[in-house]
Structure formats: structure tokens, C-alpha cells
Image (cartoon, rainbow, N blue to C red):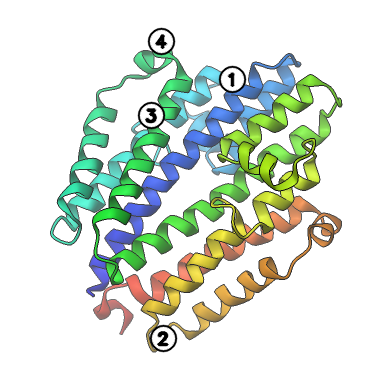
């Protein structure tokens, strides 16, 4: 496969998954902001989203204060913000257009119609209709794109690059959501109905509420939430699940220069496969997740160098 084609497929899937995961992060933050708490605590959560995406300077250039409406406008529909949902859907469509002959008609129509509908939505329309409904729409369009890919695309190298892009992005964003929310919730725990609501909202943000109930059949605790989202190999949005699939797909596209990237992926997978939540928490969850996100970034960089850089540049 031409490396430029692989590059477009990889980033098409990453941007679509990024849009979904950003919708999930914003949705849980919005839900938690409705729970009775101090204004300072609410704004701290919104500020964490900006900081986590390294957008402090870009945000400060447009807004003087951090609050729900400003952050949502910036992260949902701002075309100048490369990390907004608007920009992610546009970039997913642009990358799909570049490989129109490689993907199926159904995939193209799904991605194209998603962008055409998204670009017509102003923030005022989204806000007025209910911001939560918009987040559900983004998640549904991402699921439709993923389902169309699984149901129509030949499972060759094109499929492998799409899956690797999707799963790397998902692992990174699950780690981000957990890192942002875990310590905020631990700081404000009160053992009451509010606490249950907040932990339930976090689980729902990664479609894990029902899964948690099935796996643990007990009250929601921070340690078990972390265990489910990090180590449970059958949970579709867990770090372990994502790395299982990354390893499988990397093995299928391996070339002569990808040995080190595969080794690094294997080391990260082994840490999840044989890890214990007690050891992770003892090390410090924030520190562990920060290290994981750094290694995911390096893994993506290795994949780019091994597979996605045009051959003339790689030589």
C-alpha cells in the first residue's frame, strides 16, 4: 500500500474517533456541572479540558474567562480551533476524500453526510436544541462510520490502518477522560447520591455503566472504575482492549523497519495484560496515565515513521 494512502486512512479514523471522544468528555463535564457544587469547582473542570488539550494560549486569545458556554463554543464549533469537534469532522472528511477510491461508497457517504450536516449547525442552534443531544449525535455518527467500515470494507491493509488509528486514539482519549475526572471526583467525594451520580456519569461517558454493573455487581468505587477502564480486556473502550487490537493489527502490517515500534507496543500491552490496579494506584494514577499517554504518542510517532511517511522522505 502507498504510504500516503495509509496516512490518510490512519488520520481519517483518528479524527473521527477524536470527535466522538471529545463529545464524550464534554458531555460528562456538562452533566457533572449540573450537580450542586461551587462555581470554582465547575470552572476547574472546564479549565482542565483546555489544559489537557494544550489549548491555553489559543483559548486565551478568544476568551478572557473560563466557563461552560465559552469552553463548549470553543471545543464544539470553533473552526479556528484545530481540536474542536467541528474541525475533527472536517478533517476526517478531507482525509476520506483523499482516498475516495480506497474506501467503500457507504463509508464515503457516511463521512461526507456527517460533515455536511455538522457544518450547518451553528453553536447557537446546538445550544438552543440541547448540547447533550448534539453530543449523542456525534457519538451516533461515529458509531455509524465504524459500523459501515466493519460491514463493508475488505479486511486488508486499509482496514488494519483504520483500526490502528481508531484504537490508538481511543486509548489516548480514555486515558485523558479518566485522568481529568478521576482526581476531581476523588477530591469531592461525599459518599452520597451526588457522588453516585458523578461516578455514574463518568462510566456513561465511555459507555461503561451497564458493563460495570455486569462485571462487579456492586456499588461504584473509584478503584474499580479505574480497573475497568484500564485493565479489563473485554471492555471495548479500556486501555487493555485497545492495545490488544493494536498489537494484532500491527503484526498484520509489519515491515522490515517496524520491529522497534512493534516491540514498544508489545511492552505497553504486557504492562496492561499482567498489571494490577493496586500497583497502578500505588504508583499514582495521574503519573501512570501521563506515562501511558506519552508512550501512546511515541507509538503513534513510530507508526508514522515506519509506515506513513512517503518513501522518498523515508529514504
Q: Which mark is residue 128?
A: 4
x, y percent for residue 79: 33, 32
Neighbour class for label 4 at 10 Å: few (<14), some, many (≥20)? few
Find numbered disc 3 in the image and state the secondary structure of the residue it sits on. helix
Q: CA distance from mark 4 to mark 2?
A: 52 Å
Q: Which mark is residue 257?
A: 2
N-term-proximal mark, 1 vs 4? 1
Q: Residue under circle 3?
A: 137
Left or right of 176, for residue 168? left
Q: CA distance from mark 3 to mark 1?
A: 23 Å
State the quadrant of the C terminus.
Answer: bottom left
Q: Residue under circle 1?
A: 67
In depth, the one of 54 and 11 nearer the eye is: 11
Task: Judge whether 140 appears above or below 40 on screen.
Answer: below
Query: Is residue 259 visible in the rendered structure shown here?
Result: yes
Q: Which mark is residue 286?
A: none
Q: Nearer the viewer, mark 2 or mark 3?
A: 3
x, y percent for residue 258: 44, 82
Q: CA distance from mark 1 to mark 4?
A: 17 Å
Amino acid at each position: 500500500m502507498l504510504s500516503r494512502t495509509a496516512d490518510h486512512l490512519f488520520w481519517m479514523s483518528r479524527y473521527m474517533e477524536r470527535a466522538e471522544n471529545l463529545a464524550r468528555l464534554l458531555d460528562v463535564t456538562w452533566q457533572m456541572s449540573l450537580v450542586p457544587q461551587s462555581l470554582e469547582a465547575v470552572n476547574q473542570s472546564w479549565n482542565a479540558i483546555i489544559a489537557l488539550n494544550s489549548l491555553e494560549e489559543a483559548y486565551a486569545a478568544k476568551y478572557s474567562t473560563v466557563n461552560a458556554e465559552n469552553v463548549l463554543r470553543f471545543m464544539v464549533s470553533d473552526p479556528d480551533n484545530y481540536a474542536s469537534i467541528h474541525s475533527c469532522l472536517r478533517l476526517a472528511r478531507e482525509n476520506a476524500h483523499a482516498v475516495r477510491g480506497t474506501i467503500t461508497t457507504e463509508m464515503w457517504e457516511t463521512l461526507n453526510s456527517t460533515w455536511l450536516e455538522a457544518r450547518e449547525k451553528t453553536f447557537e442552534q446546538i445550544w438552543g436544541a440541547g448540547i447533550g443531544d448534539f453530543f449523542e449525535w456525534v457519538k451516533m455518527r461515529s458509531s455509524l462510520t465504524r459500523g459501515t467500515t466493519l460491514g463493508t470494507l475488505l479486511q486488508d491493509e486499509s482496514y488494519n490502518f483504520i483500526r490502528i488509528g481508531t484504537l490508538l486514539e481511543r486509548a489516548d482519549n480514555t486515558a485523558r477522560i479518566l485522568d481529568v475526572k478521576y482526581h476531581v471526583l476523588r477530591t469531592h467525594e461525599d459518599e452520597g447520591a451526588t457522588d453516585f451520580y458523578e461516578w455514574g456519569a463518568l462510566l456513561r461517558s465511555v459507555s461503561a455503566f451497564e458493563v460495570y454493573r455486569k462485571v462487579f455487581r456492586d456499588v461504584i468505587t473509584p478503584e474499580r472504575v479505574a480497573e475497568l477502564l484500564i485493565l479489563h480486556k473485554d471492555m471495548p473502550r479500556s486501555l487493555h482492549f485497545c492495545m490488544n487490537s493494536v498489537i494484532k493489527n500491527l503484526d498484520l502490517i509489519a515491515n522490515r523497519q517496524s520491529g522497534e515500534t512493534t516491540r514498544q507496543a508489545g511492552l505497553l500491552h504486557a504492562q496492561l495484560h499482567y498489571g494490577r490496579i493496586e500497583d497502578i494506584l500505588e504508583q499514582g494514577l495521574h503519573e501512570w496515565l501521563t506515562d501511558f499517554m506519552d508512550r501512546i504518542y511515541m507509538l503513534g510517532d513510530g507508526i508514522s515513521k515506519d509506515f506513513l511517511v512517503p518513501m522518498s522522505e523515508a529514504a
